Image (tube, helix red, strand yellow):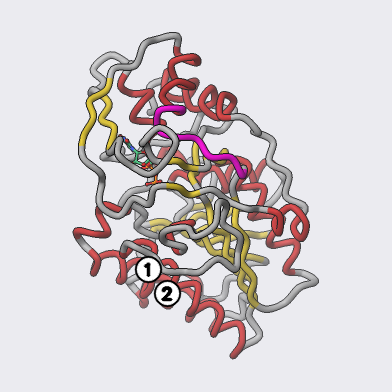
Amino acid sequence: MKLLIPGGAGYVGSHMAKYAQNQGHDVVVMDDFSTGHEWAVRDYEVLRVNLLDQEMLARSLKGRQFDGVIHFAAKSLVSESVKKPDLYYRNNVVGTLNLVHELLRNDINDLVFSSTAAIFGNPVTNSIAEEHSKLPINPYGQSKLMAENILRDICSAYSFNATCLRYFNAAGADQSETIGEAHEPETHLIPNILKSVLPDGNKLKVFGTDYDTYDGTCVRDYVHVTDLAQAHLLALEHMNNNSGFSAYNLGNGKGFSVADVIKACEKVTGTCIQFAVEGRRTGDPAVLVADSQLAFNQLGWRPQYDSLDAIVRSAWRWHQRGSR
Ligand code: UDP
């Protein structure tokens, strides 16, 4: 397949591009490099486009054909979204609308959309299935839910197919060790823990030990980024025989607290990890764990990294190489 990957220079997007190319597909990355990395996309044709620049977007897609589009281009930090909601609504909602507009004009009709567990807000069940209530508690989650709803309406109105994949906590790095998680600033737990034990690393901060969980720290479902990539290709294949809108939750179905993750990182790195306890971070729900039965049953998704240890080991190999 010939695939367009907006946001392909970012963390999940670059793993998607690599996985798709390894599976024999032809990849074109589109990115504005606001948070993505040039070093992550050396092996592909790159279109340097910001989705908010409709003219440039139209010019870059004119006359091109793709069998599928896998759309990652977005802002994705909960805490930043609380401080700058307008930035999130513009990038994630308007950006997606602009992209869909051009896809429709060019008769490109299959889209996989990078969504998030943040659309659900505070869980009312132990694990979250697709039909769980959707009441986001931060602008990031709101913006992704708005984009999902727009896609649902576009699929009803036109001959267009969209699959939304709601990731829980993407983690780990590609086994080639050439790409991995590298945000600036880094806000995610596993990279922050691993970087804290490297020379010049900052001391880890733990945000909140007074949550209503078994040890007081937040519980999350960590899923390997290459396993997420697998699900996107399966979703595109599934769309060949299943038209319209669909959505799947992607996680391992197991929750680990911040304290559990620190212990797993201690085991993998062989060090005792020092940390400071800070107040809660705004917008963080206490527990987020996926029920991914639908993706297993309908997409045939089979995550390969089934343990937190394996996920952390892959991330550690990447960070030791000095993440670019
Ligand atoms: N967290 C933390 N210290 C950090 C980064 C994250 O204590 O340096 C906590 C955060 O408050 C949340 C969990 O780790 O409870 C996972 O956060 P992350 O940013 O990795 O993912 P999110 O769940 O926000 O998408």
Compared across the picture, whether 196 is left or right of 104 comes to left
Residue found at x 39% / y 60%: 74
In percent of width and height, residue 108 lies at: 61, 75
Image height check: is 286 above or below 61? above
Q: Does the magenta stretch include residue 258?
A: yes
Amino acid beneath label 1: Gln
Can you tell which quarter of the image residue 240 is in? bottom right
- Nearer to us in this view, 165 or 67: 165
Q: Name the residue under label 1.
A: 142
**Disc 2 designates what residue?**
146
| Magenta residue span | 253-260
> Residue 1's image quarter?
bottom right
Q: Residue 2 carries which label?
A: none
Which quarter holds ligand 1?
top left
Count residues near mark 1 (Cα–Cα under 10 Å), then give few for <14, some for 14-19, many for 20+.
many
Between the C-alphas of marks 2 and 1, the distance is 6 Å
Residue 228 spot, x, y in % from top left: 60, 47
Q: Residue at x 23, y 17 (%)?
A: 200
